[in-house]
Image (cartoon, rainbow, N blue to C red):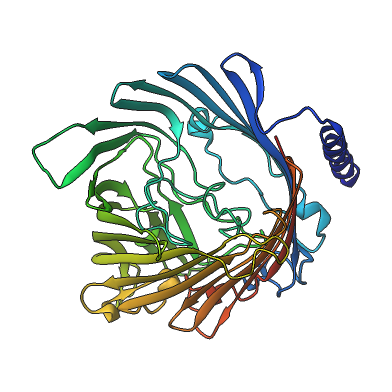
């Protein structure tokens, strides 16, 4: 098997050399009129500089040296014969070598996003170490002020740093690098078979409202939920007692939908949003308990339910011109039926609670370093404050793994990126602080060589005293240093 892995890496290296030697490749390769392809080929290596994952004590007995080794080919095929029609396909081929190269890990499935019963909807072929898939496949139709998209697609209505407030229409594939990628959710947001459309409305009745737009989507049955790392995987976040017998529910065949209205009021672009969804993360519900008997251990049967949600949201974007050059973004949502577990019960029982999430972000390009020094460009500085608040008495409900919940949770985020050397070298850092004393730090540096090559080094450090499940510090063991080699075409 190791010889096969080395052979695969050799093939990847050969492709890098051959494509790097070609001087005719462009950012997008036009095959014939209206038909083009772009994408990237990447190798990513994550070196474990933390501790052994305590959730994997049943699968390994020493600290693993690697958290990730993955080869990733993404190709984006576009056919656009006219301005009124476009056909798009995102085809991905991925190989994972983490288990083979880090011998301390036990056997696990690196590609758990798989559903044999509904395999056609995922359009994939995979095993524990390899996956080929049609990640996205849709057609765009434009007729005047009407736009329609049909097919397997991502629906992105939110834009906050490290937070999903309105960006919740699609679940996440957290199985391989959790949410630590520099692109955050772009590569792990799971597309769904949906119908999506928008209509620009010309109106003179409301004088203060301009650029009125109505957008809606419907997902008629292709309901996905967050995919977490498998037991034994480097970022496995669960260690369930042997007594647990979990029946994982799904909502395949059911319906999700949403709509938003947006428009420009003065210098503020505002939206009002509504979504009817199923919770992306499960909550346990009691089924039955079988007491121990002769030669039989006790058994607690639980249902991992993904309950329905109704989300009411809004977003505001306001750009201040010179001399401020400041963009202010606000996102907020109210979910009246967010599911939690009841506190004080013998067995898990679900209870809904109204939950309010919001964040405000300030973004400003600033000349921090003189442009004469290393040909520096404007530094992108972002500051974000977010809060989650739960109605009622938080002592009556429990969070993940029966953890205590606070009535309010606050997060402060600072992100800085400073392009240098004509934007070819970009150091940066993201820092997220949970005021209950937990933090995430992601320093990074990106170097671009020409139009096609770039090289990343970034780190992930998590810590703090608040190690409750769901907090950054609960993954105190997951500190990693990553390198990425990417050829982009």
Report the front residue among 466 and 331: 331
Rendered view: 109 above or below 65 = above
Residue 91 in the image, given as x and y percentages of width and height: 61, 31
Residue 480 in the image, given as x and y percentages of width and height: 70, 67
Q: Kindly indicate the quadrant of the structure image that contains residue 182.
A: bottom right
Residue 469 in the image, given as x and y percentages of width and height: 48, 73
Taking the image as drawn, is residue 99 in sight? yes
Taking the image as drawn, is residue 349 in sight? no
Q: Kindly indicate the quadrant of the structure image that contains residue 335.
A: bottom left
Q: Seen in the image, is 367 located left or right of residue 69? A: left
Q: Quadrant of the C terminus?
A: top right
Residue 162 in the image, given as x and y percentages of width and height: 48, 62
Residue at image x 79%, y 66%? 65
Q: Seen in the image, is 248 located left or right of residue 463? A: left
Residue at image x 36%, y 43%? 251
Q: Residue furthest bottom?
A: 465
Rendered view: 392 above or below 181 = below
Q: Tally the numbered discs.
A: 0
Report the front residue among 173 and 26: 26
Q: Quadrant of the N terminus?
A: top right
Residue at image x 32%, y 77%? 408
Q: Residue furthest right?
A: 3
Report the front residue among 73 and 297: 73
Report the front residue among 426 and 13: 426
């Amino acid at each position: 098997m190791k010889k096969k892995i080395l052979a695969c890496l050799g093939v990847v290296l050969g492709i890098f050399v051959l494509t790097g030697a070609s001087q005719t490749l462009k950012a997008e390769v036009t095959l014939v009129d209206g038909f083009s392809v772009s994408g990237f080929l990447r190798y990513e290596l994550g070196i474990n500089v933390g501790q052994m994952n305590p959730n994997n004590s049943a699968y390994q007995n020493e600290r693993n040296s690697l958290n990730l080794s993955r080869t990733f080919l993404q190709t984006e095929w576009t056919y656009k014969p006219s301005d009124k029609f476009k056909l798009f396909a995102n085809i991905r081929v991925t190989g994972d070598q983490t288990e083979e190269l880090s011998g301390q890990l036990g056997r696990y499935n690196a590609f758990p996003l798989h559903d044999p019963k509904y395999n056609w909807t995922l359009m994939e072929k995979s095993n524990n170490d390899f996956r080929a898939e049609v990640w996205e496949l849709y057609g765009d139709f434009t007729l005047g002020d009407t736009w329609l998209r049909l097919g397997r697609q991502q629906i992105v209505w939110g834009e906050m740093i490290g937070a999903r407030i309105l960006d919740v229409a699609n679940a996440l594939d957290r199985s391989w690098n959790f949410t630590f990628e520099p692109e955050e959710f772009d590569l792990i947001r799971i597309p769904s078979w949906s119908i999506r459309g928008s209509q620009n409305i010309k109106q003179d009745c409301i004088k203060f409202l301009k650029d009125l737009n109505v957008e809606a989507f419907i997902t008629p049955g292709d309901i996905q939920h967050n995919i977490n790392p498998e037991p034994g995987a480097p970022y496995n976040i669960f260690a369930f007692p042997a007594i647990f017998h979990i029946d994982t529910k799904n909502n395949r065949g059911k319906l999700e939908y949403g709509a938003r209205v947006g428009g420009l009021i003065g210098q503020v672009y505002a939206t009002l949003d509504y979504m009817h969804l199923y919770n992306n993360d499960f909550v346990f519900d009691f089924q039955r308990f079988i007491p121990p008997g002769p030669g039989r251990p006790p058994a607690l049967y639980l249902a991992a339910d993904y309950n329905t949600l109704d989300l009411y949201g809004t977003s505001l974007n306001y750009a201040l011109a010179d001399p401020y050059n400041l963009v202010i973004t606000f996102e907020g949502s109210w979910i009246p039926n967010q599911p939690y577990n009841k506190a004080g019960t013998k067995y898990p029982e679900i209870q809904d609670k109204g939950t309010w999430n919001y964040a405000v972000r300030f973004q400003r390009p600033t000349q921090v370093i003189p442009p004469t020094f290393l040909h520096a460009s404007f530094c992108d500085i972002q500051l974000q404050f977010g809060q989650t608040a739960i109605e009622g008495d938080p002592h009556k409900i429990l969070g993940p793994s029966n953890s205590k919940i606070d009535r309010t949770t606050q997060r402060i985020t600072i992100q800085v990126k400073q392009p240098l050397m004509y934007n070819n070298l970009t150091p940066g850092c993201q820092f997220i602080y949970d005021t209950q004393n937990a933090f995430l730090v992601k320093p990074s540096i990106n170097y671009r060589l020409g139009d096609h090559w770039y090289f990343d080094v970034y780190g992930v450090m998590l810590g703090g005293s608040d190690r409750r499940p769901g907090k950054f510090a609960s993954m105190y063991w997951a500190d990693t240093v990553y390198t990425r080699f990417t050829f982009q075409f």
